[in-house]
Amino acid sequence: MVTRVSVALCTYNGAAYLEEQLLSILAQSLPVSEIVLSDDGSTDDTLSTFERIAAGRPDLDVVVLRNTTALGVTANFEQALAACSGDLIALCDQDDVWWPERVERMVTEFTQRPALRMLHADARLVDAGKEPLGLTLLQTLGVSDADRAAVHAGHAIDAYLRRNIVTGATMMVRRELVERSRPFPAAWVHDEWMAMVAAATGLVDLIDEPLTDYRQHGGNQIGVTSLDASSRLGRLRAPRTARNARLLARAAVLQQRASGFEPAASASVLALIDAKLAHERRRSTLPAARLLRVGPIVRGLRAGDYSRFGLGLQDVLRDLVQPV
C-alpha cells in the first residue's frame, strides 16, 4: 500500500522565500501527495506565488485555506494539520528549504516502525541567503547527548519534560496524532504540544542528521532560541513572573489533559506529569525576596526536580537571582 504524505504549510507574508521552499518540496526523492496551505492573512504575493507553482503540478492535491482574521501560529497550524488527508503529515515553514531526501528518510522510518507516532530531525542553520551559519539546530539549542539517548531509547517524555527540543519545521507525524492532540491548548505551541502527546502515549524518535535548511532572517515568526553565554546572562536579568506563569499554565494543561489521552498514558508517565506540575507550582510561588527563596530551591534541588524538569543548575541560578 502506498503511503500518502501531506504537507501542512502555514504562511504569512512569506513571498520572499516561499518559491524556494515549494520547489524543494516538489523535488523530493519520494513525492508528496498533498499540500495544505493555511494562510494567516498575507498582504503580499504569498498566495499568488503558491498558486502559480502549484498550477504546474496537476498531479498534486492542493488545499488552500485563507484566514480573513489572523489565527496566530499555533491555531493556523492546527487548521492546516486538521485539513490534511495523508497517512503521514510533514510540517512545513514558509521560509526553509528541504533537503531532497527529507520525505523519503522519514517515510522509511515510519514504514519500518509501525509503532512510531512522531519523528523529528536536526536542521542546518542558514542565513537569509541560504549561507550556512556553521551550526545545526540541535547544537544551537544545546541538546545534550543524554537527551538524544533518552529519545532514541523510547524515553522522550523524560527529555521533553525538561524542555522542548522539537521544532515543527523538522517534524513528520501520523495523522492519528493530530486527531488525538486536538484541540491544541493556547498555552502551548503546536509542535511542542504534539511532541508531548506523542511521547506520553507512544513512540517517538529523532534523526540526528539535518534534513532541512532552517533559515534565520530576522523575520521568523518563531526562530531559534540560543543557549549561549550571553543569552543565559540575559535570562538571569529578565523578570521571572511572566515566564513562570507560562510554565505553570503549560504544566497545568498537560496534567488536565493527560488522563484523557488516547491511547492512555501509563501510570508512571501520569505520575511524572503530576510531579512536573508540582515543581512548576513551587517555582511560581517563590518569594520576591531572594534570601527567602533559598530554602525551597535547595529542597527542590535535593529532590532532583531541577534536573528532572529543567536545566539543572541553570534553573537553580535563575530562580535564585531573577527579579520579580
Image (cartoon, grey):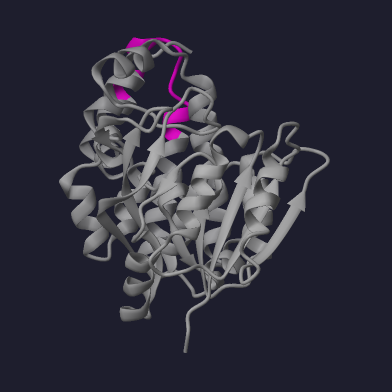
Image point (47%, 36%), residue name: 281
Image point (78%, 48%), residue name: 66
Q: Please check the rendered image and state whether residue 120 is part of the magenta-colored stretch, yes or no.
A: no
Image point (51%, 39%), residue name: 95
Depicted 86 relative to depicted 244: above or below: below
The percent position of residue 24, horizontal first and vertical second, equals: 45, 52
Depicted 31 relative to depicted 100: above or below: below
User: The magenta stretch spans which residues?
Assistant: 282-295
The percent position of residue 237, horizontal first and vertical second, equals: 38, 10
Confirm whether residue 193 shows in the render.
no
- Nearer to us in this view, 47 or 251: 47
The percent position of residue 98, horizontal first and vertical second, equals: 41, 51
Image point (51%, 55%), residue name: 91
The percent position of residue 201, horizontal first and vertical second, equals: 43, 68
- Nearer to us in this view, 246 or 94: 94
- Nearer to us in this view, 299 or 105: 105
